[in-house]
Amino acid sequence: MAQPSVTEQFVRTVGTFAALGPLVGAGVALLALSTVLISALIPLDIPPGDLLVSLLGLVLASVAVGYAIGVIPAAVAGVLCHMFAQSIRPNWAWVGACALVGGLCGGLAPAMIGVVEPVTLLTLGLCGAAAGAVCGWKLRRSRWAGHAGKP
């Protein structure tokens, strides 16, 4: 099996971050938000069907907003991680570096447009870190599978 070219590796890395990163980040944000919303809505005696429809709407809105605000920071994180892909050998260090870069990109993105509230920066930084770790793990996992049994 031939080694993929640098361009193919770049497209795969940035594409993985841009496609998967916002989805993971939206999932982390949705998990945090839904725990607060459910604890606030359950005592209001809302019928279960209405609550389910509301939560489904929240999930769809979270994914849409996650992609709208997260695809550019995720792509930037993918570019930065691609630059260091060959120099970071241990897999745990690679996943950690991807989480760090994702957290920085996710946390600094709102600061670039003027949002400097610490809670927002921290929340989006944590979403970016989780997304970076998942994307880094996925990229290395497929690389491990491709080289299984080879020195």
Image (spheres, helix red, strand yellow):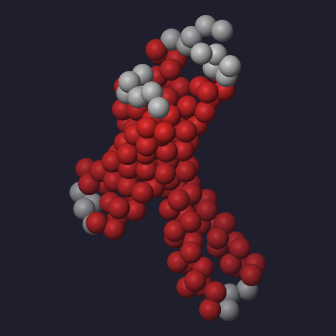
The image shows residue 100 at horizontal and vertical percentages of: 37, 45
Q: Position of residue 111 (x, y in %)?
A: 26, 54
Quarter of the image with the N terminus is top right
The residue that appears at 40% across and 32% down in the rendered structure is: 81
Task: Establish if 71 lies above or below 64.
Answer: above
Q: Which is nearer the eye, 44 or 1?
A: 1
- Pinpoint residue 141: horizontal percent, then vertical percent: 61, 33
59 with respect to 78 (left or right): right
Label total for image: 0
Q: Nearer the viewer, residue 127 or 1?
A: 1
Q: Residue 75, can we see it?
A: no
Point out the image quarter for the C terminus: top right
Please give the name of the residue rendered at 49% of the width and 45% of the height, measured from the top-left corner.
Answer: 133
User: Quadrant of the rendered structure where residue 31 is?
Assistant: bottom right
Which residue is at the far front? Answer: 151
Residue appearing at x 60%, y 79% in the figure: 38
